[in-house]
Structures are given as C-alpha cells and as structure tokens.
Amino acid sequence: MYSVTVPVPGRVRELATALYPDLVRFDTVRENHSCLLKRLGEPDHAAQLQHRTRRALEGTPPIEARVAGIDYFADPPLGAAPVVYLAVDSPALEAIHARLAEEFGAVDGLEGADYVPHVTLARGGDEATAKRLADRDTDAIEWTVGELEFRSESDGSPEGRIVLSG
C-alpha cells in the first residue's frame, strides 16, 4: 500500500523510546514512528498518486498537531489487538484526511468517519497492559506540520514529500 503520512518531531520519538520498557510485552513494537494520514493505493502507481495528492492539497497551509496522551484500540479492524498508540489531536489534520478521502475514497472501518489520527507504538498482547499505559499521564507535545511524506508499506522510507505552504 502507498500512503501519505505525517512525520513526527523528535520529541514524539523520544516519548516512544521512553515508553519502550513498558511495550516489550507486546507482540510487535514499532521502531519507526509517523502518523498515517491516508492510504492512497498501490505503489505501482506512485507518481500518479503523488500528483493527485499534491493537486488535492494545493494551498494547504502548515497545520498544528498535538500528542494528547496514550490510548489503545481494543478491537482494531485489522491485525492483532490491542493497538497502543499516541493520540494525535488536530482538527486540521482530520480536515486534510477528509479532503483526501473525498479524492481517493475511504477504507471502510479505518478512514473517513472512522479515522483516528495516531502514532502506533505496539500491538498484540494483553489489554490490561494497554489500559495501564492509557491511564498514564504524559506531557502534551505540540508541533507545526509543515510537510507530509509519501511512503510505501514495503520499505517504509519516505519516497517523496509535500510541503504545506498555504
């Protein structure tokens, strides 16, 4: 799958690293952190998907985002449960997602009205541990999102960028 993601600042990665000792009980712990914004399609159409995305987001200014704490999906629509994540609060990010969902369609159960901006930390394991993590207080982390990245699920590294410049 080819997607557009929101890169996160070092402070978010540092928080994920600080939480690592509590995440090792999960089946899978993420080492690379970003916020999935929208699944676009198959990577063999990457150039076309990038072009359509850039056109849909022309004139979009930088936006504000904030990690608001830890939460979890007890019953995610795909993959092992639970999924522990950093909750991202950003109405502007949700508006961009909605614009891209109009352009590309929404994946049922994951996007459109079901979209929850987040940074996945770990998945699989027991729900009691996920709940304890979600009950933990963390300091809010605020940042300005000035660019988005294109990524292919196959290797996860950025394959292009969109600068939000208004």
Image: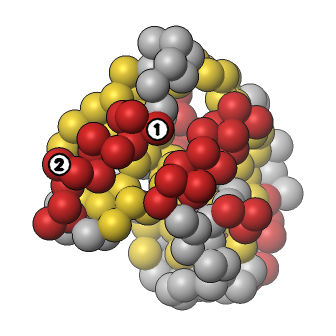
- Horizontal side of 54 relative to 71 (left or right) equals left
Quadrant where the image shows the N terminus: bottom left
**Residue 159, how many percent across, how many down?**
18, 44
Visible residue check, residue 99: yes
Which numbered dot is residue 47? 2
Q: Residue at x 80, y 51 (%)?
A: 136
Q: Position of residue 153 (x, y in %)?
A: 27, 65
Could you say where residue 146 lies in the image, as x and y percent from the top left? 46, 19
Identify the residue at image location x=85%, y=57%. 135
* Near-viewer residue (56 or 97): 56
Mark 1 or mark 2: whose residue is earlier in sequence: 2
Tell me, yes or no, whether the two marked residues, 1 and 2, touch with CB atoms within 8 Å.
no
What is the x, y in percent for residue 53? 39, 42
Q: Nearer the viewer, residue 122 or 102?
A: 102
Above or below, 80 relative to 59: below
53 displayed left or right of 128: left
Mark 1 residue type:
Ala
Mark pair 1, 2: CA separation: 14 Å
* Residue pointed to by mark 1: 56
**Compared with residue 12, is residue 120 higher up or lower down, i.e. above or below?**
below
